[in-house]
């Protein structure tokens, strides 16, 4: 009986251990393995060349994911280093989109890089190099695409190309996006003679890949061809990974019976997983994909790269993947020394407390040294300087400090100091004039200290916060996988907020519509165009906009560029609320980039365009409760660099997390219309604009001060 009970106990312990090993960790757990990269990246292609892993990705969270062409590299799959690749521009214009890159090693030993771009039609372009990181040379000096828009069928958007080398040496390409209404994914054979042309291309019938959206990925298991792809919508929690299988690269394909095999988890800490690639290590498979951030940025384009184990039940069946915050066990033994800052005590000059209609979340100082790429320390606002202090607990040797700032592609100016007592500080590293981006930023010295202090002084882009995914400290040096350094930026540090009232327009103080002076700090004269009159509505003197606008003759202040904070506050009355248009104020150029989040405006309509305008229904912020027609309302739009909020009569109506890329260089501040019209059709009694975000208490006070009086 004793032996039997012992056997049962051992069995129970075994299963308990198995369950414990598989149990996921909380998203904020120190040392959590997912995401694997510190920053905003999507559409990952994972490759291993030699003994180095490379991840090529879309740089996310700006201008509809149109950031710098980026590759990450690592030897241990834990410590990743960022490099901004130098990609030759098109002959006609600079490249903005670098979407969903893929890379293959040719039979000639060269590396061929492919990516999607929609600036001259939605095409796939190719480049070649002797190295996996460049420098790159065009496959076509005339910018002829490898896969052109409208191929293999008319109007087919050629994006999200992935290439697959079969066991017979042939290379096949799979591509297409929005395929649920574009006739199915495309497949073709790459011309290996020039690596830049497709042969025998065709569309895969939609019924062979049910519920598709984008991001086809081909792999082979035994004799079966596994066509994986992403379905539903990349903007929300429905995004998922699915698959079909075949005996041929061209199909016909049979859908997997257990689709989808990767989806949002129950507690939504892994939200909207998809657009993946697969890493094979010996007989093990790992799916590398992106997911949405938490708290989630509007539109779902602040994405992060994750990895989880993928298991085949047989050659044609993939088991459902369990997405995790924990990630995977170490693939490779790391030679990087101990990070002595891990979980050490941290303090900061401030930290951001996100309060919105959706979230209540704190970007705590302790998140800066928890070795978790899902969490970061972020200062309370986007003013600088801001500082972060790490207390190591006792005096220790410090030879290297590595900092992963929020944005890997933009530089931060900072200094590092060290101290024995936390009071008297000495300079460890001076990067106060730094103009080189990178992640991590690496600073070497040889000191003994208990405290390390990071002070962020300035940023490359307007409105970016002092924010750190991780700061790591080492007592010994170690080799880096590659000796690469990003090219220094020629852009001067960003202009900071003036904390002033920029625009002050009050109909109660105006008698002549032809000479209206701006009483705000930037001055200037408003020029009237179209049909505007001075009238009284309910005894309140106001501008009646019928089909006109006021345009300020001053340039838009640089403090409103990119992610700059603002407040627009207006007393308005709209007799009839249209579903679209109805722009109260705009201050961005809609055409400079033509991409979501590069345009801002305040609107008063009943559609999704409704309050905060950013060009695309996936990003615009509507009114939850539309202000009642034909009544005076105080409508205020604020943005602090993290959260956009709309207030109606002093009450918060809606909010959303945002990151902007406002295009102001050729823009004008326009009252009563956008830069392409969309005229407001109602009354504006007054309008004020600031280059910082007023809080609700300030707004309530301002509402009382500016409330128009009946005459």
Image (spheres, rainbow, N blue to C red):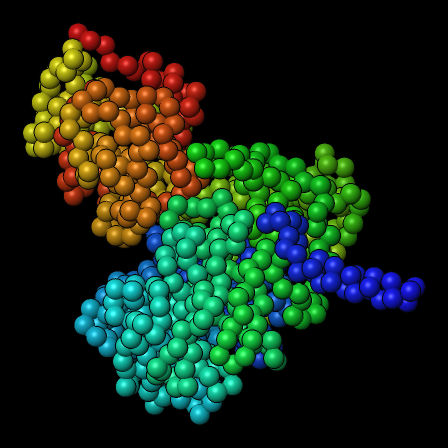
Q: Give me the residue at 59% from left, 49% from top.
A: 27
Q: How many numbered markers are drawn?
A: 0
Figure quadrant of the N terminus: bottom right
Reply above or below: 708 against 462: above
Q: Nearer the viewer, residue 233 or 596?
A: 233
Figure quadrant of the C terminus: top left
Residue 202 seen in this snapshot:
yes
The x and y percentages for residue 479 are 66, 68
The x and y percentages for residue 422 are 73, 36
Reply above or below: 103 against 644: below
Q: Give me the residue at 56% from left, 37% from top.
A: 362
Q: Give me the residue at 52% from left, 54% from top.
A: 265
The quarter of the picture where residue 574 lies is: top left
**Which residue sits furthest left?**
531
The x and y percentages for residue 84 are 46, 63
**Which residue sits furthest front?**
1
Q: Give me the residue at 37% from left, 59% from top.
A: 232
Q: Nearer the viewer, residue 100 or 285?
A: 285
Q: Nearer the viewer, residue 237 or 174?
A: 237
The x and y percentages for residue 211 are 35, 64
Q: Is residue 251 left or right of residue 145?
A: right
The quarter of the picture where residue 139 lies is: bottom left
The quarter of the picture where residue 414 lies is: top right
Q: Is residue 510 left or right of residue 117?
A: left
**Which residue sits furthest bottom?**
168
**Which residue sits furthest right?**
2
Residue 665 seen in this snapshot:
no
């Amino acid at each position: 009986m004793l032996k039997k009970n012992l056997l049962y106990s051992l069995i129970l312990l075994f299963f308990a251990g198995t369950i414990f090993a598989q149990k996921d960790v909380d998203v904020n757990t120190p040392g959590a393995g997912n995401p694997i990269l510190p920053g905003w990246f999507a559409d990952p292609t994972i490759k291993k060349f030699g003994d180095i892993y490379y991840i090529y990705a879309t740089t996310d969270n700006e201008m509809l994911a149109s950031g710098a062409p980026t590759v990450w590299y690592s030897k241990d799959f834990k410590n990743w280093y960022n490099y901004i690749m130098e990609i030759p521009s098109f002959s006609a214009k600079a490249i903005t989109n670098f979407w969903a890159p893929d890379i293959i090693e040719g039979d000639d030993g060269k590396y061929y890089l492919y990516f999607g771009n929609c600036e001259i039609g939605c095409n796939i372009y190719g480049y070649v190099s002797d190295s996996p990181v460049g420098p790159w040379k065009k496959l076509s000096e005339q910018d002829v695409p490898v896969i052109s828009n409208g191929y293999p069928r008319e109007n087919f958007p050629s994006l999200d190309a992935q290439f697959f080398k079969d066991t017979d040496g042939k290379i096949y390409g799979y591509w297409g996006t929005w395929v649920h209404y574009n006739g199915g994914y495309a497949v073709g054979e790459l011309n290996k003679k020039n690596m830049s042309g497709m042969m025998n291309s065709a569309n895969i019938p939609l019924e062979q890949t049910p519920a598709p959206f984008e991001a086809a990925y081909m792999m082979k298991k035994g004799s079966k061809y596994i066509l994986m792809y992403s379905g539903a919508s990349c903007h929300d929690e429905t995004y998922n990974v699915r698959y079909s299988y075949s005996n041929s690269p061209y199909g016909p394909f049979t859908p997997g019976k257990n689709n989808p095999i990767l989806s949002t988890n129950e507690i939504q800490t892994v939200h909207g997983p998809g657009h993946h690639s697969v890493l094979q290590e010996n007989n093990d498979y790992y799916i590398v994909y992106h997911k949405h951030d938490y708290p989630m940025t509007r539109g779902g384009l602040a994405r992060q790269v994750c990895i989880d184990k993928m298991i085949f039940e047989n050659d044609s069946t993939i088991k459902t993947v369990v997405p995790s915050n924990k990630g995977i066990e170490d693939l490779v033994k790391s030679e990087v020394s101990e990070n002595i800052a891990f979980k050490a005590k941290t303090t900061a000059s401030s930290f951001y407390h996100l309060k919105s209609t959706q979230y209540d979340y704190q970007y705590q100082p302790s998140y800066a040294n928890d070795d978790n790429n899902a969490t970061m320390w972020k200062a309370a606002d986007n003013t600088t300087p801001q500082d972060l202090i790490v207390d190591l607990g006792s005096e220790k040797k410090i030879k290297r400090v590595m900092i992963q700032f929020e944005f890997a592609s933009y530089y931060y100016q900072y200094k590092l100091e060290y101290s024995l007592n936390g009071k008297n500080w000495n300079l460890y590293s001076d990067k106060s004039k730094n103009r080189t981006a990178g992640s991590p930023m690496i600073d070497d010295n040889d000191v003994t200290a208990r405290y390390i202090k990071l002070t962020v002084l300035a940023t490359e882009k307007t409105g970016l916060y002092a924010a750190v995914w991780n700061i790591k400290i080492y007592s010994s040096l170690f080799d880096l996988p590659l000796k690469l350094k990003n090219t220094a930026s020629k852009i001067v540090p960003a202009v900071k907020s003036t904390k002033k009232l920029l625009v002050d327009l009050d109909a109660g103080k105006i008698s002549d519509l032809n000479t209206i002076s701006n009483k705000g700090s930037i001055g200037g004269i408003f020029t009237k165009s179209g049909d505007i009159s001075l009238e009284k509505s309910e005894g309140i003197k106001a501008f009646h906009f019928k089909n006109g606008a006021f345009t300020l003759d001053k340039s838009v202040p640089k403090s409103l560029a990119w992610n700059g904070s603002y407040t627009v506050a207006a007393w308005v009355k709209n007799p009839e609320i249209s579903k679209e248009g109805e722009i109260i104020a705009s201050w961005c150029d809609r055409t400079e980039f033509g991409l979501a989040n590069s345009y801002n405006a305040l609107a008063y309509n009943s559609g999704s365009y409704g309050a905060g305008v950013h060009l695309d229904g996936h990003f615009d912020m509507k009114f939850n409760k539309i202000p009642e027609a034909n009544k005076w309302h105080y409508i205020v739009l604020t943005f602090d660099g993290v959260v956009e909020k709309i207030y109606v009569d002093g009450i918060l109506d809606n909010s959303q997390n945002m990151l902007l890329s406002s295009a102001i260089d050729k823009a004008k501040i326009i009252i009563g219309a956008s830069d392409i019209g969309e005229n407001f059709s109602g009354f504006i009694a007054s309008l004020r604009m600031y280059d910082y975000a007023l809080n609700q208490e300030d707004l309530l006070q301002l509402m009382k001060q500016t409330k128009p009086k009946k005459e």
